[in-house]
Amino acid sequence: MTKDEALKLALEQAFAAPVQEPAGDEWTPCMKLPVVVHVRKQRPGESHVSTREGITPVKPDDLIMRGVSGEEYPIGRAIFEQTYTLDTTTPAAQRTWVGLTRWEIDAKMKENK
């Protein structure tokens, strides 16, 4: 058996194996805090942006997003539209978590189990 064939067989076996869920109660559901980021259209002639990971190419339909630490990175328009909204108003249901201490959040999470 060649190296490529062995690798292919190993990958097929790994993907065929059932996914094992972690034992016990180690996973706790969480909700990502609402974070406002900024987005812009590409500048004329812009083909790359300098990200924290280095120089990253920009695809023709990408938007440029600025993260919470001021970093920039390209984001595909379709992904942006699926995961972000231009409305920065925080939903009322999420506002109740803002300002809670770590201990208050932990207590709330235990109540909701």
Image (cartoon, grey):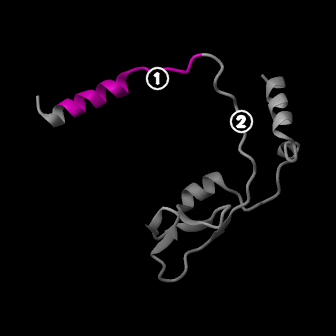
Q: Is residue 9 above or below residue 59?
A: above
**Residue occupying image coordinates x 84% and y 29%:** 107
Magenta stretch contains residue 69: no
The residue lying furthest to the top in this view is 24
Secondary structure mostly seen in the magenta stretch: helix
- Residue 17 placement (x, y as % from top left): 38, 21
Q: CA distance from mark 1 to mark 2?
A: 22 Å
The disc labelled 1 sits on which kind of residue? Val
The disc labelled 2 sits on which kind of residue? Cys
The numbered disc on residue 30 is 2
Element type where label 2 sits in the image: loop
Q: Which residues are magenta?
A: 6-23
The numbered disc on residue 19 is 1
The quarter of the picture where residue 111 lies is top right
- Residue 84 placement (x, y as % from top left): 67, 56
- Residue 11 placement (x, y as % from top left): 30, 31
The residue lying furthest to the bottom in this view is 44
Q: Which quadrant is the N terminus positioned in? A: top left
| Mark 1 neighbour class, 10 Å CA radius: few under 14, some 14 to 19, many 20 or more | few
Residue 70 relative to residue 98: left or right = left
Report the front residue among 2 and 90: 2
Q: Is residue 7 above or below residue 41?
A: above
Report the front residue among 12 and 79: 12
Q: Earlier in the sequence, mark 1 or mark 2?
A: 1
**Residue occupying image coordinates x 23% and y 33%:** 7
Magenta stretch contains residue 11: yes
Residue 41 relative to residue 98: left or right = left
The quarter of the picture where residue 56 lies is bottom left
The residue lying furthest to the left in this view is 1
| Mark 2 neighbour class, 10 Å CA radius: few under 14, some 14 to 19, many 20 or more | few
Q: Which quadrant is the C terminus positioned in? A: top right
